Amino acid sequence: MSSIDLKSILNFSAFRSEPDDSSAPWKRRFPSEKTVFFGIGRARLTWREIARSGKPGDQESVRVEPKEGLAQISEHVKAATDRGWCSVSLNTRYVISLETNLARRTGSEDMLKSNPRAVLGGKFERGKRYAVTHNPETNSSILLSFDEDLTRKTEAMFCDAGFRVGRICCGAYILLRHALAEINRTKGSEQPVSTFYIICYEGAVCALVQDQDRWLELRSRTDVYEDDPTPITDLLAPFQSRLSPTINITLACDEPMPQLSDRLAIVFPGRTVNDLSEPGLGASLMIKN
């Protein structure tokens, strides 16, 4: 064994994930390294610096097309990182849908990345990338899809600006999976869970009805709101007549939105709002995974 190999074992670097290993958690890929988390919306670019400790900083933003925004801020943001590594959340031009009877055999989630047609069957579309979350109690699944071409163009745009893209993700999907995990801690029909999930992430909204563990209805739209929460409650108000009386609300936003919580209490009277929102929640979850 060479002295270099021995040193890498003694300082644990031999056991760290490679920076370009997208299957490994961010905090293992970039231990004690400053990185940055970007968000792309319609005519909006946001970013948060990620400290060496893994703590996300405050969000900053510019309301211009992302390519123009990168040209304005790339040098200053890149200088705040160690090697220019970044993660990018696509907050527009994706689809989150509720599907049934998707393949669940062992290894199907990995196969979704390499051979999605084998998992999706007739629901497969050429030129798409996918991710899936299965309901463990029923045959329903939540399917995320976005354009392969958009992903490649996004990565090229950041590389042209001098960044190294370590992950491309969807912030609303990350928050939805987080909310599902937080609420469904106790599995099994003896204690079935009912709630109405509302996810808000940089203009995007995703709503999912869970009744007695069953996922009944999902609605997802991008570019719904900016600062005023009124478009969110306008979009969600029709659900009130379709929710059973015992269903309360689970809210998860990337940033706390007190105005939204107040509006929901008016639009959905008599229903408790369980607010999981935290500052920089999307970035914090991305770092852990």
Image (spheres, grey):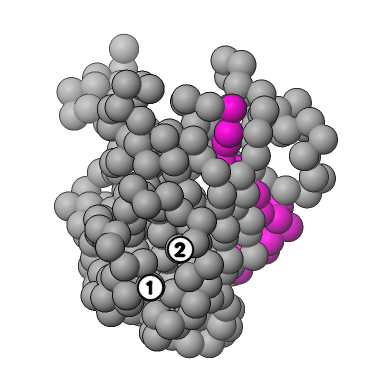
- Compute the Cα span from label 1 to label 2: 8 Å
Please report the residue visible at 33 percent of the width from the left and 48 percent of the height from the top. 246
Q: Nearer the viewer, residue 187 or 33?
A: 187
State the mark number for residue 267: 1
How many marks can you see? 2
The x and y percentages for residue 18 are: 41, 36
Circle 2 is placed at which residue position?
240
Q: Is residue 123 above or below residue 82?
A: above
Please report the residue visible at 53 percent of the width from the left and 67 percent of the height from the top. 238
Can residue 232 be seen from the camera position used here?
A: no
Q: Secondary structure at mark 2?
A: helix
Query: In the figure, residue 109 lies in which quadrant?
Result: top right
Can residue 253 be seen from the camera position used here?
A: yes
Region of the chain picked out in magenta, as a range: 139-159
Query: In the figure, residue 58 lies in which quadrant?
Result: bottom left
In the image, taking residue 89 as reference, residue 131 lies left or right, namely: right
The x and y percentages for residue 61 are: 39, 81
In the image, taking residue 138 as reference, residue 190 lies left or right, namely: left
Q: Secondary structure at mark 1?
A: helix
Please report the residue visible at 43 percent of the width from the left and 34 percent of the height from the top. 213
Please report the residue visible at 45 percent of the width from the left and 63 percent of the height from the top. 240
Q: Is residue 275 above or below residue 100?
A: below
What's under tag 2, amino acid-wise?
Gln
Task: Kindly give the residue lying farthest to the top in the view shown.
Answer: 1
Query: In the figure, residue 1 lies in which quadrant?
Result: top left
What's under tag 1, amino acid-wise?
Val
| Mark 1 Cα-neighbour bin, 10 Å: few <14, some 14–19, many ≥20 | some
Mark before the other along the chain sequence, 1 or 2:
2
Asked if labels 2 and 1 touch by Cβ distance under 8 angstroms, the answer is: yes
| Mark 2 Cα-neighbour bin, 10 Å: few <14, some 14–19, many ≥20 | few
